[in-house]
Image (cartoon, rainbow, N blue to C red):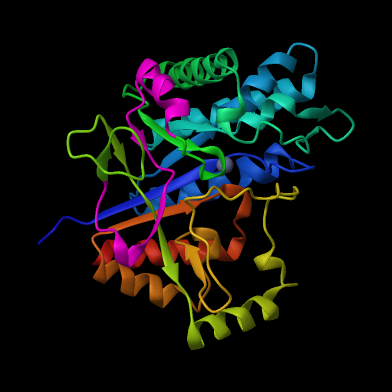
Amino acid sequence: MMEKKILLTFDYELFLGSKSGSVDNCLIIPTDMLLNVMERHQAEAIFFVDTTYIMRMCELEDSNINVKRDLEKIKQQLIRIVKSGHKICHHIHPHWIDAQYVEVENQWNLSNDEHYCVETLSEEQKTQIFDFSVSFLSEIMSVAGVEYDCCGYRAGGLHIEPFAAVKNDFARCGISEDFSSEALIENITESYRFEESTLSPATDGRFIEHPISRIRIYGLRKILNGVFYRLTKRSPKYQKFGEGIPSVPKKAEHQISHGKLEFSLPISIELLTPVLLPYYKKLLKRYSYIHFLSHPKLQSKATIELFDSFLKFYGRN
Ligand SMILES: [Zn+2]
């Protein structure tokens, strides 16, 4: 039998629009709950840390006590993460370089999204951002006393193409595995190698792509799921922990788009509902490769409970 590969990945980040939300609600509280659930089921995950955000915090920490406190909480949580056996890897949202810190709210405004995509940066900016990411992640691991190569990367907004824009930075920083492309689960069975672009697999390529799994939702399941969302909209248990305002997504050309009749979703913990849980369980039996893409900030008490029952089921099968 083929080995099952379930990848649990999280984007460890604030909101990326006009209000970032707070560190406690977007990161610390939901991540601790997720870590507790995973500990119970001995599940391991990869956390993609938005290090350009951390870079901006480092610039302000000496002049602002709130930023310093937030940064310290993040570092402590990341240390817990790696000590518990999870991995931390690079996640780069370049438009953090233009973010404005709003002191009265202790939040950030990221309305300026001119540098949303990495290819809009100068070589110097790219070098600064990638090098910071490497040094920050290695600092966390050395404090935690854990050793492994942080060779994984997820592009902000999943904009990995054009790959040429980051290829040199990958090579310089020892990054060899990308987790940014998306594919329908029925079309992908495993990770693959590439060299010039994630869109053209190459058996002797130096890089590995781990595509994010998407599922098609249609028919009765889609209707029931919609009804479920309407019914629980005001229920406190279903309120997201994070309170920020998201960025307007910029779709890259290669990203999956769907018409009115077709509807596809990433496999994600925040999208789990009692309607979809049995479907996720069925997928687990049918496919050998499933790549979850989730965000602590988008969890609610209810989605974390559903994640708990999913892992319980996974452990039994
Ligand atoms: Zn992100």
Quadrant position of ligand 1: top right
Question: In this image, 70 relative to 203: left or right?
Answer: right
Quarter assignment of residue 205: top left
Question: Considering only vertical position in the picture, is 196 above or below 158?
Answer: above
The picture places residue 14, in percent across and down from the top left corner, at 66, 40
Q: Residue at x 48, y 15 (%)?
A: 135
Question: Considering only vertical position in the picture, is 24 above or below 267?
Answer: above
Question: In this image, 53 relative to 163: left or right?
Answer: right
Quarter assignment of residue 17: top right
Res. 76 visible in picture:
yes
Magenta region includes residue 179 = yes
Q: Nearer the viewer, residue 307 or 84?
A: 307
Q: Which residues are magenta?
A: 163-191
Q: Nearer the viewer, residue 69 or 154?
A: 154
Magenta region includes residue 239 = no
**In the current view of this chain or complex, which residue is farthest to the bottom?**
220
Question: In this image, 19 relative to 226: left or right?
Answer: right
The picture places residue 46, in percent across and down from the top left corner, at 41, 40
Work out which quarter of the rendered image holds the C terminus and state it: bottom left
Question: Considering only vertical position in the picture, is 146 above or below 23?
Answer: above
Counting every numbered tag in the picture gives 0
Res. 144 visible in picture:
no
Question: In this image, 120 relative to 310: left or right?
Answer: right
Q: Nearer the viewer, residue 183 or 202?
A: 202
Work out which quarter of the rendered image holds the N terminus and state it: bottom left
The picture places residue 178, in percent across and down from the top left corner, at 38, 37
Q: Residue at x 46, y 19 (%)?
A: 134
Q: Residue at x 23, y 60 (%)?
A: 288
